[in-house]
Amino acid sequence: MMKSVKVGLFGLAMSVIGAVALPAQDAHAQGDSSPNGKSPICIASYAACIAGANGNAAALAVCQMQYALCK
Protein backbone atom coordinates (compact mmCIF):
# COMPACT_ATOMS: atom_id res chain seq x y z
CA MET A 1 0.00 0.00 0.00
CA MET A 2 2.67 2.51 0.99
CA LYS A 3 4.77 1.59 -2.03
CA SER A 4 1.91 2.47 -4.37
CA VAL A 5 1.38 5.77 -2.54
CA LYS A 6 5.08 6.59 -2.87
CA VAL A 7 5.04 5.72 -6.57
CA GLY A 8 1.94 7.87 -7.05
CA LEU A 9 3.51 10.82 -5.27
CA PHE A 10 6.68 10.39 -7.31
CA GLY A 11 4.62 10.41 -10.51
CA LEU A 12 2.80 13.54 -9.35
CA ALA A 13 6.11 15.24 -8.57
CA MET A 14 7.43 14.37 -12.03
CA SER A 15 4.25 15.75 -13.59
CA VAL A 16 4.63 19.02 -11.71
CA ILE A 17 8.27 19.29 -12.74
CA GLY A 18 7.31 18.62 -16.35
CA ALA A 19 4.48 21.13 -16.18
CA VAL A 20 6.72 23.83 -14.72
CA ALA A 21 10.21 23.23 -16.11
CA LEU A 22 9.45 22.54 -19.76
CA PRO A 23 7.00 25.41 -20.33
CA ALA A 24 9.39 27.69 -18.43
CA GLN A 25 12.14 26.86 -20.91
CA ASP A 26 9.80 27.54 -23.82
CA ALA A 27 8.59 30.72 -22.17
CA HIS A 28 12.14 31.96 -21.86
CA ALA A 29 12.52 31.64 -25.62
CA GLN A 30 9.04 32.92 -26.56
CA GLY A 31 8.00 35.32 -23.82
CA ASP A 32 6.40 35.07 -20.39
CA SER A 33 3.49 32.75 -21.17
CA SER A 34 3.08 29.17 -22.32
CA PRO A 35 1.46 28.25 -25.68
CA ASN A 36 -2.01 28.29 -24.08
CA GLY A 37 -1.41 31.74 -22.58
CA LYS A 38 -0.88 30.54 -19.01
CA SER A 39 2.25 31.47 -17.09
CA PRO A 40 4.39 28.77 -15.48
CA ILE A 41 3.27 30.08 -12.09
CA CYS A 42 -0.38 29.42 -13.02
CA ILE A 43 0.47 25.91 -14.17
CA ALA A 44 2.42 25.12 -11.00
CA SER A 45 -0.30 26.58 -8.80
CA TYR A 46 -2.93 24.51 -10.61
CA ALA A 47 -0.89 21.32 -10.21
CA ALA A 48 -0.44 21.97 -6.49
CA CYS A 49 -4.15 22.73 -6.10
CA ILE A 50 -5.12 19.48 -7.86
CA ALA A 51 -2.70 17.53 -5.65
CA GLY A 52 -4.15 19.12 -2.53
CA ALA A 53 -7.76 18.49 -3.58
CA ASN A 54 -7.43 14.73 -2.96
CA GLY A 55 -10.27 13.95 -5.34
CA ASN A 56 -12.75 16.30 -3.65
CA ALA A 57 -15.09 17.46 -6.43
CA ALA A 58 -15.74 20.88 -4.88
CA ALA A 59 -12.02 21.53 -4.38
CA LEU A 60 -11.30 20.42 -7.96
CA ALA A 61 -13.92 22.85 -9.24
CA VAL A 62 -12.26 25.66 -7.28
CA CYS A 63 -8.88 24.67 -8.77
CA GLN A 64 -10.28 24.79 -12.28
CA MET A 65 -11.95 28.16 -11.67
CA GLN A 66 -8.72 29.65 -10.26
CA TYR A 67 -6.74 28.27 -13.22
CA ALA A 68 -9.22 29.77 -15.69
CA LEU A 69 -8.87 33.18 -14.04
CA CYS A 70 -5.07 33.03 -13.77
CA LYS A 71 -3.07 34.94 -16.40
Image (cartoon, grey):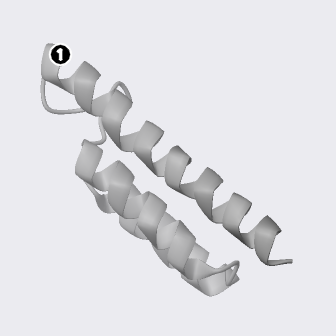
20 w.r.t. 54: above or below: above
* Amino acid at circle 1: Gln
Quadrant hosting residue 30? top left
Quadrant hosting residue 54? bottom right
Which residue is situated farthest in the top direction here? 29
28 w.r.t. 59: above or below: above
How busy is the neighbourhood of tag 1: few (under 14 within 10 Å), some, or many (20 plus)?
A: few
Residue 29: x %, y % from top left: 16, 14
Residue 22: x %, y % from top left: 36, 28
26 w.r.t. 2: above or below: above
Q: Name the residue nearer the viewer: 57 or 18.
A: 18
Q: Residue at x 30, y 54 (%)?
A: 42
**Quadrant including the N terminus:** bottom right
Q: Residue at x 37, y 50 (%)?
A: 43
Residue 4 falls left or right of residue 33 = right
Which residue is situated farthest in the front direction here? 3
Could you tell me which secondary element the residue under label 1 belongs to? helix
Tally of numbered tags: 1
Residue 60: x %, y % from top left: 59, 74
Report whether residue 61 is seen: no
Which residue is denoted by mark 1 in the rendering?
30
Q: Residue at x 53, y 46 (%)?
A: 14
Q: Name the residue nearer the viewer: 53 or 21.
A: 21
Report whether residue 25 is seen: yes
37 w.r.t. 15: above or below: above
Q: Residue at x 52, y 78 (%)?
A: 52
Residue 25: x %, y % from top left: 25, 24
Residue 47 falls left or right of residue 37 = right
